[in-house]
Amino acid sequence: MFPFRRTLTALAVMAASFAAACSSDSSTGPAAPDPVIGVSATATGTDKITVTFAGRTGETYTIERAEGAAGAFATASTIPTLSANGTQTYNDAGLKVATLYRYRVTAIKGSASSAPSIEATATTFALGFASADIAADITTSRTLYRDTTYTLKGFIHVGNGATLTIQSGTTIKGDFNTLGSSLWIMRGAKIQAQGTADQPIVFTSSRAAGQRQIGDWGGLLIIGNAVDNRSGSVEIEGSGTDGTAVVSGKNYQVIYSGGTTPTDNSGTLSYVRVEFAGFAPSLNNELNSFTFAAVGSGTRVSYVQAMATLDDAFEFFGGGLDGDHMVAYEVGDDMYDMSEGFSGRLQYIIGFSSVQLTPRTGAGFLASDLEGIENDGCNGSGCDNGFDTQPFTVPLIANFTLVGCGNANCVGASGGHGLMLRRGTGGFYVNGVVGRWPADGVSLRDANSFARGGSVAVPDLASADLQVRNVYFMETPALFQAASATQFTLDATGNSLTLGGSSATALFARIPATGTAPTGVADFDWTPVAGSPIATGGMATFTGKIATKAGTFVTPTSYLGAAQPGGAKWWAGWTNYARN
């Protein structure tokens, strides 16, 4: 029996060896590495998340990211083969604000991959989740970040040649408790504030929505080194209430006259909104939402909005910057005010006012003298040749839509004009729509201004420095203020000026009726409706002085107003509308 048992044992060993050999021959590759452990995700900013996990020697890792609770995974990064065990970190950037992201990690060793790790999640921070005060002047270059809400506590001057850079999506508040708090970009300094349509830069009141008022804070001022036509030392309106001594954070006197560089560059504003601003320590001595004093043509301003302002939405003292896609909502005084030799070019501008808002207590005087455009030559001290002081105010304003309040309740005794042209001003005003002005469409107020157009009813395209061409007027009692010894008119037919019978609501896709309070941006669509008289009638080809002035910056259009029929709604997404 023993030999037989030995034979059976040998056969069993042989069978086991054969089975092992067969198993080895059928293997598909090396064993897969174990799943990755310790994966975590932590938000570190509005667009950043840090992913960590436990790494192992000899393994490569693929990090996958998915947006939202149900989004599909895609590779975000790969970490090369490790030479030692240890915690691995991946900093993910360029993400969406306040958005949930999911992460998982896969280990790779040779040609084998592990199963994906357990998912880790994190949500990027909302804009402005942190806070900081600015209470002193800025004298070295600085960046304001979108993850922080900043509060201006005082009159903050950016000087000493510094550049203030502001990230898109950043909110800057003017401190309500420090009357007149404001931001001043001084001569020689720069501001680089470049927002986007979905992340505009917003300057606003420190008070909560629903409590805000015009004049809650001072506004944004830029002072350049371009030319102004007033001689001597001329200070910025509203400055100097704390004297002439330069004290950080105080409202010391700021001079803007005497510039010599027409091409001066004070920086860039794009997708910037200024809300509930203005400060008027005395009558005709005010800070505006946007104040541009002697700002040169090297400065660029695009896609900017002034909303709910104590005085002017945009005021230009001399200089010659170029601007486009500008919006003024609910203005205490003028929508666009240009004077003292301003020679810039503005295209695609909107103005809308429906009510006279009530300023905060202590903000100062309210002009209540609403105009669409108020342009002056030279007035006051330093006008060495009176209204004929050069350089003349000769801007080019193209594709403007200016809609007033429609009644006398929100304008002063001398207000309510769509265009107020006076004190020796010139300028080219083309392809516009002007309506709901209770006084008239145009007040051409003095012989000096009439002389800029050659003192004739149809100014010569080749030589005149004052031209009002291809403009449609509606819901306005008269095209021009009645002629007199101090009032002048232009010929409607010769200048393609139309006093139409259409209502404003019939011209545009959507704007509120007169006397109706807008409820939000959705109430505004400035696109001409089909068949609207403003969908055509534009000066489609520029000639003469208008063509020379336009250069390559201003484009002629076959339509009137700020919006192209069927075109992009360029104000959508970044503008706002609120009364408090």
Image (cartoon, helix red, strand yellow):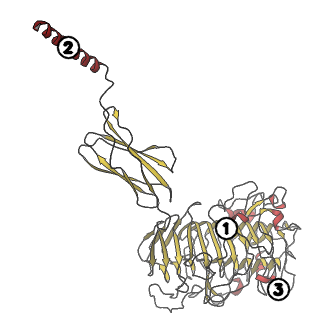
Element marked by disc 1: strand
User: Which disc number belongs to residue 346?
Assistant: 1
Q: In the picture provided, is 425 more to the left or to the right than 531?
A: left
> Can the viewer see residue 566 in this picture?
yes
> Can the viewer see residue 265 in this picture?
no
Within 10 angstroms of label 3, few (less than 14), some, or many (20 or more) residues? few
Which residue in the structure is indicated by mark 3?
486
Question: Residue at 76% across / 56% down in the picture?
Answer: 565
Question: Residue at 71% across / 68% down in the picture?
Answer: 350
User: Which disc number belongs to residue 375?
Assistant: none
Q: Quadrant of the N terminus?
A: top left
The amino acid beneath tag 3 is: Thr
Upstream in sequence: badge 2 or badge 3: 2
Compare residues 137 and 144 and report the one nearer the observer. 144
Upstream in sequence: badge 1 or badge 2: 2
Above or below for 167 versus 72: below
Which residue in the structure is indicated by mark 2?
12
Question: Residue at 57% across / 88% down in the picture?
Answer: 232
Compare residues 280 and 232 and report the one nearer the observer. 280
* Of labels 2 and 3, the one closer to you: 2
The amino acid beneath tag 2 is: Ala
